[in-house]
């Protein structure tokens, strides 16, 4: 953090963060042109993913979705930087959470919660959920999200600072179970967000589902944590209303994991996520090489 070579980057990011949104979206338009036309950032992967995942669209329609995706991705970049200098009232106007009473009721019952969400819309803005609860983050409850530390320590610290902007905690993936056990011993209810839409890490239990027209290995660790710690489970259904405005519908999957069969929580999440993506394909993160390693459905 003391390395002087990051001072210009820090200054630039600060200057961007204090700009009004109309200027930010002008910058986003420039970023879009650079990413899509000049650098062609992962264009082949995006085109391939859309072609295989959305056969119901013709080539022209998929190309339109592709361009919309890169516009959204460019917006995500400037909107994330803006977290460093956005007021609570601004973010509440632009990121709305519906059905927050589900979370507050579970907190009142001293229950902890697993929240499935994904790389849709602006996932970094989801940390503003703390502003919608009647419970005080960092006091009587904790709002957490699981993360993987980045290799660049300066950038890692920068992102952690942004993610704590609204009083939430970032828990390292490798120690999340231990951290949640600590909160349980302290009798502090928490909600913890798990980004479970990418390919599983090595060592994760193999579970294959049909997802977006692909046999897909999916992350099962989220369900395992919920079961081990007897946590309620919700899904955060992200919608992009218009540029710079999002809504999240909080959907209850289960309050009692013992009532659901093994892997049915994961299967429910996959179906809900697929519905979210199909409703508006352009808001999902298509640049990830999700299906690089081929798998086959059981009994095939």
Image (tube, helix red, strand yellow):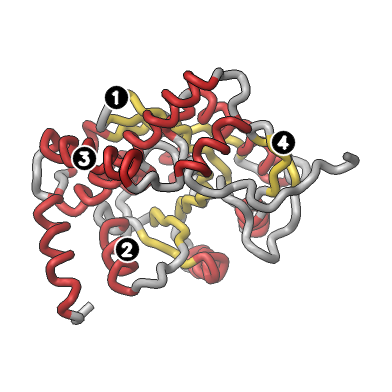
User: Disc number at residue 210?
Assistant: 4
Q: Give 94 or 19, whichever is nearer the viewer.
A: 19
Q: Give 102 or 58, whichever is nearer the viewer.
A: 58
Q: Which residue is mark 3?
A: 30
Return the x and y of residue 283 as percentages of the image width and height. 42, 33
Between circles 4 and 2, the one closer to the viewer is 4
Of the two numbered discs 4 and 3 on the same chain, state the one appearing first in sequence: 3
For marks 3 and 2, give the CA distance. 26 Å
Q: Residue at x 42, y 23 (%)?
A: 64
User: Disc number at residue 242?
Assistant: 1
Q: Residue at x 26, y 52 (%)?
A: 166
Q: Residue at x 50, y 50 (%)?
A: 195
Is residue 157 visible from the viewing direction of this image? yes
For marks 4 and 2, give the CA distance. 34 Å
> Residue furthest toward the bottom?
2
- Residue 84 appears in which quarter of the rendering? bottom left
> Residue furthest toward the front?
38
């Amino acid at each position: 953090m003391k390395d002087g070579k990051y001072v210009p980057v820090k200054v630039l990011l600060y200057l961007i963060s204090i700009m009004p949104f109309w200027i930010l979206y002008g910058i986003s338009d420039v970023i879009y042109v650079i990413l899509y036309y000049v650098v062609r950032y992962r264009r082949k992967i995006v085109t391939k993913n859309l072609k295989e995942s959305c056969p119901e669209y013709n080539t022209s329609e998929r190309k339109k979705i592709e361009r919309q995706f890169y516009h959204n991705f460019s917006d995500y970049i400037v909107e994330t930087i803006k977290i460093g200098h956005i007021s609570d009232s601004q973010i509440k106007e632009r990121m709305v959470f519906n059905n927050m009473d589900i979370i507050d009721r579970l907190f009142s019952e001293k229950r902890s919660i697993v929240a499935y969400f994904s790389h849709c819309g602006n996932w970094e803005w989801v940390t503003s959920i703390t502003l919608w609860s009647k419970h005080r983050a960092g006091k009587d409850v904790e709002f957490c999200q699981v993360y993987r530390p980045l290799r660049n320590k300066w950038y890692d610290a920068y992102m952690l600072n942004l993610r704590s902007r609204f009083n939430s905690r970032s828990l390292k993936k490798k120690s999340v179970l231990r951290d949640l056990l600590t909160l349980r011993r302290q009798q502090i209810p928490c909600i913890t967000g798990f980004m479970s839409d990418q390919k599983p890490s090595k060592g994760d239990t193999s579970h294959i589902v049909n997802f977006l027209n692909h046999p897909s290995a999916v992350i099962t660790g989220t369900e395992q944590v919920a079961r081990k710690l007897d946590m309620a489970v919700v899904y955060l259904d992200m919608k992009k209303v218009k540029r710079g405005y999002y809504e999240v519908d909080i959907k209850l999957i289960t309050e009692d994991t013992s009532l659901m069969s093994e892997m049915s929580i994961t299967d429910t999440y996959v179906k809900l996520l697929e519905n979210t993506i199909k409703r508006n394909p352009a808001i999902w993160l298509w640049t990830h090489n999700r299906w690089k390693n081929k798998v086959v459905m059981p009994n095939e």
